Amino acid sequence: MAFRQLMIEYTHPSLQRKACLQVTVDDRAAIGPWVATLAARVGYPLVDAFGAPLIYRLRSVSGAFLLTTGQFADARFPSGSHFILERERQTLLPRREQGEQGEQDQTSLAALWVSRRSLLGVLSACSVLGFGSGVTTAFAQHLLMHAREAIPPISLRTLFRDHQQTVRTLTWSPDGLRIASGGNDGMALVWNEEGRVLFRQQFPAPVSALAWSPDGMQLLAGTAHTVSFLNMQTGALLAENAKQHTAAITALGWTQGSSMEALSASADTTAVVWSAQSHQPLVIFRGHTSAIEALATCETTVVTASEGGLARTWSALSGQEIHGYYAQSQRPLRTVAFSSRGSLAIGGDEGVIYLWSDARTCQRQVPDVFGVHCLDEAIRLQEHTQPVRALAWSPDGTQLASGGDDHKLIIWSLRTMKPLLLQGQQDAIGALSWSSTGSLLVGALGAGVALWRLHL
């Protein structure tokens, strides 16, 4: 068994600066799958916007060696050689035009399944990365042998491009048949999985948040400091309120169960519970002292997360806190998601996802200057390298999708607490929403929305 050291230079996809890695490679490894695995691990996109695979290669700095196919044993270069990871542009597959149904033909290389065991870790600035003959080689050989017959874990179903500016919010209808998206162009669009627009509403300000009622009858929209209620059967504007909040709406939601009420959160530090019938405020939560960035609900339990790094758990019925606040980081929190099982995930500028198995209760809490502090230990999910902007649970609560400024889409297993899938995208991920069927996921990528089909 022979091993060689390589120095690999690449461009960091989100920081847009040069970086390098020292890696150890087994001569028996197949070059193509090994390079694809490396590209995925450093955050390079593996498919273009139309789902066509992007192929990468290693080129020696001297230009004497070009590593694309075969085994490393076939390439005669000394250990310690310096290579550049680059896209093999001349061999890209041609893009396919979207058909009438918006279906994209996919190849089995449209996505790669990357776990922490596939690679042994990436450290900044010429750190050491070990590619041995164990899991990584077996993984690469598996990809090579089964690329034709295996169903990819993720494939692009539709790329929706009807927004003219950045998409900021996404929500599925409860029946899993329609998607609502809103963006900086002031448009709220409702469309199906083929990408056909079914309804559009123009607002005078960017659409910062959308939330579909559990019965599918109403769509809640947040624009500037205005909360609007739309009838999803007729498209009519049922009500709007521009007076309750005094700063931008940042998040919206609905309670579930016997009590179905709407919720809004704002940079004015307050959250409001609204009547689904009269569209008037019922409860005002004033527990935060900094801008609220995100909210999530589990039945009538609400969690709001703030720019100050605190997440508070309270009742939509009374407006009173249920237990002590969570404070894992002093950096701003940007996204929060409740699973159907009561599990809570929170992400923010730190780049770490914090997870509690049941956030409806707290086992250990103490009073302090900010109120009552919940000391229940959180599970830390660490794979993102920049702020986490979006979280979404699968309907059964067994998987969690995350995305952020590092362009990575990650789907986590709640059984192993490790990634089931890691895929680099061509833009930062600003929002995610999982369909009620469990097989479709949408993500906001700049001014576009990707609709992926999942086979996990």
Image (cartoon, rainbow, N blue to C red):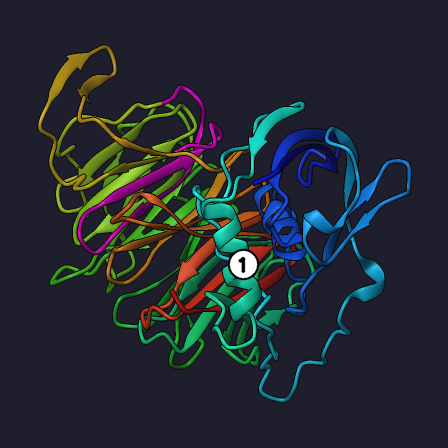
Furthest residue toward front: 1
Q: Amino acid at mark 1?
A: Gln
Furthest residue toward bottom: 100
Q: Position of residue 323 (x, y in %)?
A: 13, 30
Image quadrant of residue 301?
top left
Report the side of 366 relative to 351 (left or right).
Answer: left
For residue 170: magenta? no
For residue 345: magenta? yes
Segment colored magenta = 329-352
Residue drawn 91% across and 36% down? 62
Q: Position of residue 139 (x, y in %)?
A: 49, 54
Q: Is residue 53 visible?
A: yes
Residue under label 1, please give it. 141
Q: Nearer the viewer, residue 22 or 386?
A: 22
Residue drawn 56% across and 41% down? 1
Report the side of 17 relative to 108 (left or right).
Answer: right
